[in-house]
Image (cartoon, rainbow, N blue to C red):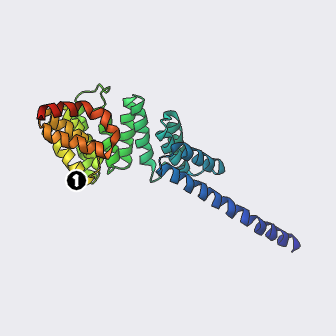
Amino acid sequence: MRKYLLAALLFAAAMPCVADQQKSIADVYREANQFLRKKDYKDAETAYTRAIEMNQSYETFFYGRAEARFGRRDWDGVLADTAKALALNPKSPKAYKALCLRGEVFAEKKDFKSALGEFGRAIAMKPGSAEAYAGLADVYSKKDYSGNRRIQKALANYTEAIRLDSAEDRYYVLRSKAYFAESLYKESIADYDQAIRLNPRNDDAFAGRGVSRFVLSDYRAALGDFRRAIEINPGLKTILENFIEQAERMTS
């Protein structure tokens, strides 16, 4: 009897330590997520690493660190963390996102075959993933990609991404750029219009629409777009100043 009582007391004494450890992991993970939302990728990576050191069985910790490492352009680190996360739980709701992240990394490394493969796996896992279709389109639209009909394939996949998620302004901007590459300037402007309707502070959309209007010799409208883009993002001034100077000469 005394033996069992002693064992019970020892177990009870250990319980607060377990609870404290679990709370500590939760706090560290929460902190890591906060850093990631603020785009403080260095501190986010450090915090996720601390969480992993405390418990290596949670795939979400590896997913989080992979995103932080992506922000720091640590491509090999992203591939290692996503591989570990997928090995821990291949059926995780975040698994298709890990595949998309891997696709982006391979595209950055110019390994386009592997990139297309990862996005294809993501679509097979989640056929309704607009993110995966947009990722495929991004690969096809790369200037270094040498496949046949690359822009047409990019347009088709951006269109599917928009069909799946018509509220995402970024997809319209990306398809606009593909239209521009095909000299389809009116279609490009129409997509920029929709992106701006969805997000009136999309500086990329204003800048891109301005360039399309400039090519069509609508210099006054282009100037308005360039100025609005710079108002939203002053960092665009250097990029757009040559267009602005030429448009001002044409309208003076």
In this rendered view, identify the residue nearer to me: 94 or 190: 190
Count the labels in the image: 1
Pointer 1: residues within 10 angstroms few (<14), some, or many (20+)?
Answer: few
Residue at the image point whose x is 35% and y is 35% from the top:
116
Apparent side of residue 185 relative to residue 82 in the rendered image (left or right): left
- Residue extending farthest to the right is 2
Residue at the image point whose x is 42% and y is 29% from the top:
109
Say which element carries label 1.
Answer: helix
Apparent side of residue 108 relative to residue 44 in the rendered image (left or right): left
- The image quadrant that residue 240 belongs to is top left
- Does residue 75 show up? yes
Q: Position of residue 21 (x, y in %)?
A: 68, 59
Q: Position of residue 26 (x, y in %)?
A: 59, 58
Location of the C terminus (image quadrant)? top left
Location of the N terminus (image quadrant)? bottom right
In this rendered view, identify the residue nearer to me: 53 or 36: 36
Return the residue at label 1: 197
Apparent side of residue 146 relative to residue 88 in the rendered image (left or right): left
Question: Is 48 situated above or below 238?
Answer: below
Residue at the image point whose x is 39% and y is 48% from the top:
125
Q: Position of residue 83 (x, y in %)?
A: 51, 40
In this rendered view, identify the residue nearer to me: 173 or 133: 173
Which amino acid does the dot numbered 1 rest on?
Answer: Arg
Apparent side of residue 230 relative to residue 46 in the rendered image (left or right): left
- The image quadrant that residue 222 belongs to is top left
- The image quadrant that residue 180 belongs to is top left
In this rendered view, identify the residue nearer to me: 164 or 21: 21
- Does residue 175 show up? no
